[in-house]
Image (spheres, rainbow, N blue to C red):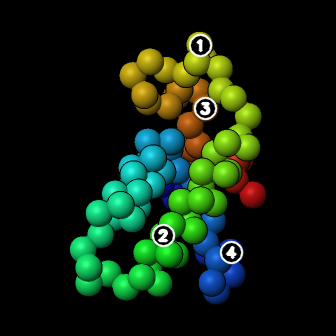
Amino acid sequence: MELERVRATVLRGTFQVYELAALMAAVRYVTKSAPPEIPPESLQQLSDLLDDYDRQVRALPATHAASAPRDGRQDPSTQHTPDSPSTHG
């Protein structure tokens, strides 16, 4: 995971798919089974975040399964290195 501050209240993140999936699974779990002490406003923010995430994921172009490594790791030829140009911008 890589985070970059764009403005005082805006961050840009670059994630491996599994990293973002783990975060969103945790958010989904909390929204469905939150203890009563979690404020309703916080749960609504998480629910809104999930709605936005789900909408964004549906809008992504399909991937080609044949080009993805079967073990879930990123193809080394596509990994960002300090000498390669940034792919998020």
At which x and y percent is residue 14?
Answer: 57, 54
Q: CA distance from mark 4 to mark 1?
A: 35 Å
The residue mark sitting in front, 1 or 3, is 1
| Cα distance in 3D space between marks 3 and 2 | 32 Å
Q: Which residue is mark 3?
A: 78
Q: Nearer the viewer, residue 50 or 12?
A: 50
Residue 6, labelled with which disc? 4
Left or right placement of residue 4 versus residue 27 in this view: right
Instruction: Check disc 2 and give the amino acid type.
Output: Leu
Element on which disc 3 rests: helix
Give the structural element (helix, strand or loop) at label 1: helix
Q: Is residue 61 left or right of residue 31?
A: right
Labels 4 and 1: the sequence-earlier one = 4
- Residue 80 position, x and y percent, is 59, 43
Image quadrant in which you'd find residue 84: top right
Marked residue nearer the N-terminal end (2 or 4): 4
Task: Look at 45% across and 47% down and name the residue there.
Answer: 21
Q: Earlier in the sequence, mark 3 or mark 2?
A: 2
Query: For the residue marked with disc 3, what is the amino acid?
Result: Thr
**Residue count near mark 4 (Cα–Cα under 10 Å), binned few <14, some 14–19, many ≥20:** few
Q: Position of residue 68 (x, y in %)?
A: 55, 22
Residue at 43% across / 75% down in the picture? 43
Look at mark 1 in the image and give the residue it sits on. Answer: 66
Asked which secondary structure carries label 4, the reply is strand
